[in-house]
Amino acid sequence: MEKEKKVKEEKEEKEEKTNPNDFAIEEKSQKNLKTISKIISVFAKIGEVFSIIGIVGIVIAMITVPIITSNIKVSNSEEIKYVEVFGQQVVYERTEDKISFYLKDDEEHKTEVTDKSDVVALGKAIDFIEDKNLSKIAIIAEVYFVLIIAVLVVTVLELKKVYQLFKNINEGNTPFTKENNELLRSIGKYLLIIFVISFVMEMFTSMIFDTSSPLNITTISEILFVYCIIYIFEYGFKLQKATKGRIYSE
């Protein structure tokens, strides 16, 4: 009896010391996961760089918009309607079906917009310029730029986390780690912040242009998806600890 008990204890001890690699998922699947993770991390880094470039571009626009608006004049008299930019007058004519543009004294080179959706969109823009003075337009533009910069800054922070997450998955033996769970939570938080800022931008747009502001279902779905992945990773992490890493190589 004592001998059987000793044999059983030795067997259990041996199982505990077994290399988790013996229970790892097949090498091909692991390799595919690492390849995909590496690709995603590269795209995340590229997206981060482009977002930073976008921030620089918006900052430049914030500086130039006041300069441009101060050199724009609008005339919407019944005789002739034109927009003067840095001394150059662009005359425009509007009908229900089209909008025409040409430089003053150069009517031969007239440009016409006839597409229905373009006419409507351009018409709204012209109405906006005619009804509001340029100083107000400059202020509105600056508010937009601030909101866009906020979105881009949060996007950069989010992509940093995405890059680090998939870099960890590529370089590590298991995706189910505490650090990866925290990175996923940060990504979900940043997506939520982006959604809130984007919603504020849409509401602001609807107030300025007197249009409806539809709820962005796509972004909501993305946030819900990320939070589902968070709980899946947390479950995988707990399951891995409970099985001493035998569901995945460590």
Image: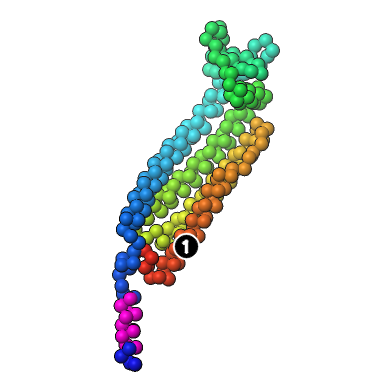
Q: Is residue 129 above or below residue 24?
A: above
Q: Is residue 136 above or below residue 223?
A: above
Task: Tell me if 85 is positioned left or right of 80 in this view.
Answer: left
Answer with the quarter of the image where residue 28 lies. bottom left
The one of 206 and 95 positioned closer to us in this rendering:
95
Q: How many marks?
A: 1
Task: Tell me if 41 is positioned left or right of 65 in this view.
Answer: left
From the image, tell me which residue sits under label 1: 234
Q: Residue furthest bottom?
A: 1
The one of 191 and 204 positioned closer to us in this rendering:
191
> Which quadrant, please, contains the N terminus?
bottom left
The one of 142 and 12 positioned closer to us in this rendering:
12
Residue 88 image position (x, y, % from top left): 54, 14
Q: Main secondary structure of the magenta part?
A: helix
Residue 66 image position (x, y, % from top left): 55, 28
Q: Is residue 14 magenta?
A: yes
Helix or strand or loop: what does disc 1 sit on? helix
Question: Which region of the structure is painted magenta?
Answer: 5-15
Residue 92 image position (x, y, % from top left): 60, 15
Residue 232 image position (x, y, % from top left): 48, 60
